[in-house]
Amino acid sequence: MGSIKIAPSILSADFSRLRDEIQAVEKAGADWIHVDVMDGHYVPNITIGPVVVEWVRKVTRLPLDVHLMITDPDQFAPEFIKAGADWVSIHPETCKDPHASLKKIRALGAKASVAVNPDVPLDKIEAYLPDTDMLLMMTVFPGFAGQAFIEDVLSKIERVRKVVERRKLPVLIEADGGIKADNIGRVIRAGAEVIVSGSGIFKTPNYADTIRRMRQVMEGK
Ligand code: DX5
Ligand code: ZN
């Protein structure tokens, strides 16, 4: 397993100061920026479109990790990649042919990721592993920031880590939802290596202190 990456989700940032917020987490030690895209159809919330990603791209050098929670990722993934997305996660239940969607994302030059909802069993996603660069394991149901972490997903993360290692696949495991300094240790020990945290970072007073604390916990200090 490589080094652990921390990806603050800007959904919990102050959007009136989005550039400052992104640069503040970058300075505080963030590795990636997680962008939650919701269309009001796949989930009952509306957030960010390609226009915002285009502006975000101009204010940070960190990889942009775009999580599409929309009913038509095939239509919009190309626009997000053009706007600067480095990683694109799709929920396979929103695609007519998830294999084709993943291949298209890769062909357009981005890394392709499969998002796995808490109630989706692993046998439903194993077939996508050869076409994916990452699995985004949802530790809440998609739709909103600030929800409670679903403990049951930890054992699924452990199992998926074993599958990836057994099959020697170059697939990262990301965890997303309800992760804060007080539970990040368990998520890492289960096998996640990219950690999304929205309110766990942006709703704390000092981002550098919070990210430092997260790294200490990860190192078992
Ligand atoms: C949930 C989103 C998450 C969420 C994370 O639908 O995919 O990325 O914004 O926010 P927290 O860390 O506050 O749960
Ligand atoms: Zn997300």
Image (spheres, grey):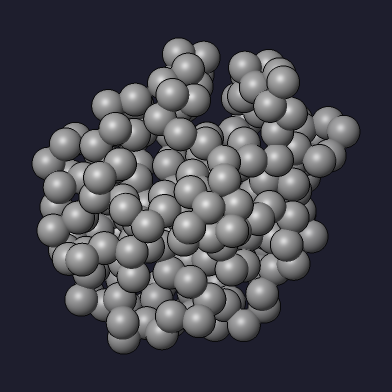
**Does 54 sit left or right of 27 as displayed?**
left
Task: Tell me: residue 67, above or below residue 80.
Answer: below
Residue at (48%, 66%) from the top-left corner?
A: 137
Q: Exactly how many numbered labels are in the figure? A: 0
Identify the residue at image location x=51%, y=49%.
Answer: 38
In-image side of 47 versus 25 (left or right) = left
Q: Is residue 112 above or below residue 60?
A: below
Q: Quadrant of residue 142?
A: bottom right
Asked if residue 87 shows in the view, the reply is yes
Q: Position of residue 135 (x, y in %)?
A: 38, 62
Query: Relative to 187, is 62 on the left or the right?
Result: left
Q: Is residue 176 above or below residue 128?
A: above
Residue 164 percent across, percent down from the top left = 31, 71
Q: Residue furthest top?
A: 58
Question: 218 and 18: which one is in front?
Answer: 18
Residue placed furthest toward the front: 41
Q: Residue at x 37, y 57 (%)?
A: 71
Q: Quadrant of the C terminus?
A: bottom right
Tell me which corner region of the image, top left, top right, bottom left or bottom right, holds residue 54: top left
On the image, the x and y values in percent for residue 83 come to 34, 25
Q: Is residue 157 left or right of residue 135?
A: right
Residue at (87% x, 33% y) in the render: 205
